[in-house]
Image (cartoon, rainbow, N blue to C red):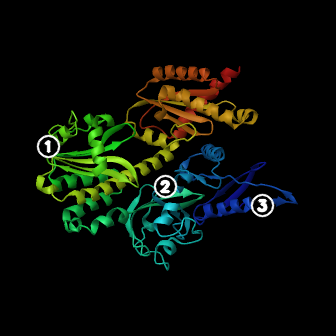
Amino acid sequence: MSRLDMSLSRISTSSFIFFFKKEGHEDMEERLLHAANRIHDITEIKGAPVTLYLQYAMVSRKETSSIDGMLRLLTDRLAVGEEHHYGESLQSGDRIVFEREKFDKADESVFITDPHTWEVLYANRAMLKNTGYPEDYRWQGKKCYELWGDGKAPCSFCPMMNLRRDRFESWIFHNPTTGVDFLMRETLVSWKGKTVCFSTAVGLQTYLSHYLHENEQIYREVQANDIISAGLSEKDPEKGLMKMMERMAHFLKAERILIMEENKEELRCTYEWNSLAIPSRKDALQHISKEKVRPFYDYLLKKEIVIENDVPRLVTNLGMKKIYVPGLQRMATGLLTLQGQRLGFIEIVNPAPESCEGGGLLLRTLATIFAILLRNRDMLKEMYRLGHTDELTGTGNLRAFEDYAASIPEGTKTAFFYCDIDNLKKINDRKGHHSGNEAIRHTAGALAEQAGLTHTYRLGGDEFLAVAADMDEQGAAAMAEAIREGFKRRNVSVSLDHAVFTAPFPPMEKMLGVIDGKMYENKREREK
């Protein structure tokens, strides 16, 4: 079938290729998804039960300069989709993929909406509970403004039209039904073949309201408002943390502010603000055993807020032998917790004595905001990791490779090692996909053993790429042999070759074409 603006051809028993001009067909992705759903709905043919499934991918002209490159991209994206069973998701470009189940039981409120129709596509239990609905409420088919707005029309202040894929938007939303204020973080992602709005919401009233009615001094103090707004106005949580620390230090006239985060056994300083008159202590405050500061930490856990004007006396009373911050005489320390989870603490070093009088409420409130920003930072990092990591092997994916290649300084000689697994389809057909997955993991392991896991990338299916910067041809040849030895030890048959390029690099398709040609010759030599 062909028209002036589109063409459909059958290229094998069950494969078709479809060309169309994007101009005038901007809704083509939605139409393809609709076609897939119609095929999925077919359950019987001539009285016989059937299960039909359509897996499809899309490539735009901007992504490749040749038909061969286009077919390679289409094949890779279909292979990824089939391997991971992404179902209806349209394989168009790199995707940020996350397991929805991770958010089902999350403490944070999470929901997904259609940016064109405002229809709610997903809402976790926390979102329903925190907005006054029972956990089993039937939200399907509802609009977001019907559930959480005035019920009549989209909110006039809704930032939906300003959302982008490359960043989060932050804003404060007041729920008119429950009267709760939420810190909203929203961005655009791909899900089930369409662009959707991914949102998280944290109820600020939960943490602030029961403190505000006891003492309105926080909101009377312009400085305190300035500290809070500085953190919440930044799109990057880490920048928000540093801005809050800087303004808090000036407000309290402190020498230094530290954020100490904890894991099971240790404390470590992850953020520090210090005045220009004193050196940084951040590097010295890493990997501190909790046992060494256990007396103080237990004391802090009981009180949550500790304001002390004579730290040496407190240390003596607690039976501690060491002060980890030199010159520490006065301190204000607040425990960082969020939804019952302990994250660490914030410590203000040597604040002005008068600034800490009655400052417990201020510190408690700001500690809550710091904890929220730390959690937002972790969520962003997890989203980034999912978008740049191959889940099967733990190596990077195509997007991770492109980011790293773009960061290599101009003029740097860099070796690229490209390989594919021999007869992976036969392994899957004869021994099962478990054996095929093992072959993929062993291949990744051999490459990562030489290039490092962070510089090894799975491009899709059976294809891998490893990168070694600052390496000439002699070093690359030696490393290629070491990789081949790794394949032999792992008992996997892999075709590999390499080439050395100097940054800035030619398009990836051209580099792979050069290496692929050498690899083809390598295969021919082995088959003789």
Instruction: Estimate the spatial distance between the alpha carbons at disc 3 and disc 1, rounded to whole Å.
Output: 75 Å
Task: Give percent across and percent down for residue 93.
Answer: 55, 50
Q: Residue at label 1? A: 329
Q: Nearer the viewer, residue 370 or 343?
A: 343
Q: Is residue 156 left or right of residue 50?
A: left
Q: Residue at label 2? A: 106
Based on the displayed image, in which of its 4 quarters is residue 409 positioned? top left
Q: Is residue 450 above or below residue 505?
A: above
Q: Residue at label 3? A: 42
Q: Is residue 394 left or right of residue 17?
A: left
The mark closer to the camera, 2 or 1, is 1
Q: Is residue 14 left or right of residue 243?
A: right
Callout 3 environment at 10 Å: few (<14), some (14 to 19), or many (20+)?
few
Task: Give percent across and percent down for residue 58.
Answer: 61, 53
In the image, what residue occupies the spot 49% across and 55% down?
A: 106
Disc 2 residue type? Ala
Task: Give percent across and percent down for residue 19.
Answer: 65, 56
Q: Nearer the viewer, residue 64 or 407?
A: 407
Sequence-wise first label, 2 or 1: 2
Is residue 192 at all visible to an observer of this figure? Answer: yes
Locate the N terminus by quadrant.
Answer: bottom right
Is residue 198 at all visible to an observer of this figure? Answer: no
Asked whether the beta carbons under mark 2 and mark 1 sit within 8 Å of each other, the answer is no
Disc 1 residue type? Gln
The mark closer to the camera, 2 or 3, is 2
